[in-house]
Every structure is written in C-alpha cells, then in structure tokens.
Amino acid sequence: MLFLSLVAVPLLKKDPDPSSAQRGFVNLARRFRRLVWIALSLLVITGAILLPAHVDISSSLSEWPAALIIKLSLVVLLIVVSVLHDKIIGPKVRTLKNSPTSELVVAEKILIRLSPLIGRLTMLLGLAILLAAVFLVRI
C-alpha cells in the first residue's frame, strides 16, 4: 500500500502521457493485488489463532479490551473496502474511463474522482490497524 502510494504514484505522475501512466499503475496494482490478499488472509488467520491469548472468547464483547475491538472493526472495514475497491469500484471505473466524458453522468464522474481516494483509504486503514496492534500489545 505504501509502495503504491508513496513510490509508484509520484513516479507515474511524471509520465507525460496520462493514459500510459494509468495503464502502468493498473498493471502494477494488479501484480500486487494477489500478494496483498495473501498477506491479508495470513494476518486474519494468525489473528484468529492468537485471539485466545488476549481474551476469553466465550466472554462478552464488552469485556474485551477496547483496542482489540477497534482493531477487529478496522480489519473488517479494511476487508469490506478492499473487496469493494477490487471487485466493484475498480472494474467500474476502468470501464467508465474508456467512455467519452460527455456521456458520463455526474455520479459516474464523482466515482472516477473518488476511486484513488478509496485506495488511499485502504492504506490509512492498514496503518490504523498497525497502530491498534501497538496499543493492544501495550495493554
């Protein structure tokens, strides 16, 4: 996430041909997508295995540490946003970008503009999960 946002995007913005830069970014993101989903799956699996070390799973959620509940909520939100971005919004935006701008309705233009922000939201969610994990370890 950090690589795409902090390295790839600034590099590709220097490309004089915006459509070439966009194709380059999409190709790079597609290559990383599988790795991202594998890493996210491993984190969810290991988190589920380690969960009993932090809480009594049979106890009420209200007894769980707030940092853990926040972290789990952020993980669920990250998965939902990632699925929406990869499976619904991303393909829709790619299709819309191939359409003439004059044929797009306002909502479609907004979706095109918001799509990169959704990608950055996943990065922020990942960092927030990391921060929640730090707080969880300190408890």
Image (cartoon, rainbow, N blue to C red):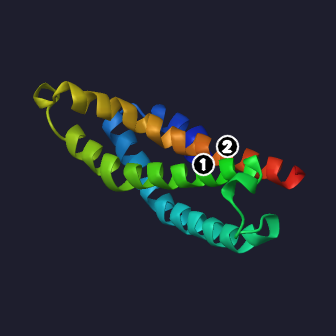
Question: Dot 1, how many residues are within 10 Å of its Cα: few (below 14), some (14-19), or many (20+)?
Answer: some
The residue located at (34%, 48%) in the rendering is: 90
State whether residue 112 is above or below residue 38: above
Q: CA distance from mark 2 to mark 1?
A: 7 Å
The residue located at (67%, 47%) in the rendering is: 70
Numbered label attached to residue 74 = 1
Q: Secondary structure at mark 2?
A: helix
96 vs 55, left or right, is: left
Q: Position of residue 35 (x, y in %)?
A: 54, 65
Numbered label attached to residue 128 = 2
State whether residue 66 is above or below residue 107: below
Q: Position of residue 119 (x, y in %)?
A: 48, 42
State whether residue 98 is above or below residue 59: above
Q: Position of residue 36 (x, y in %)?
A: 54, 61
The residue located at (69%, 71%) in the rendering is: 46
Q: Pointers 2 and 1 in contact (CB under 8 A)?
A: yes
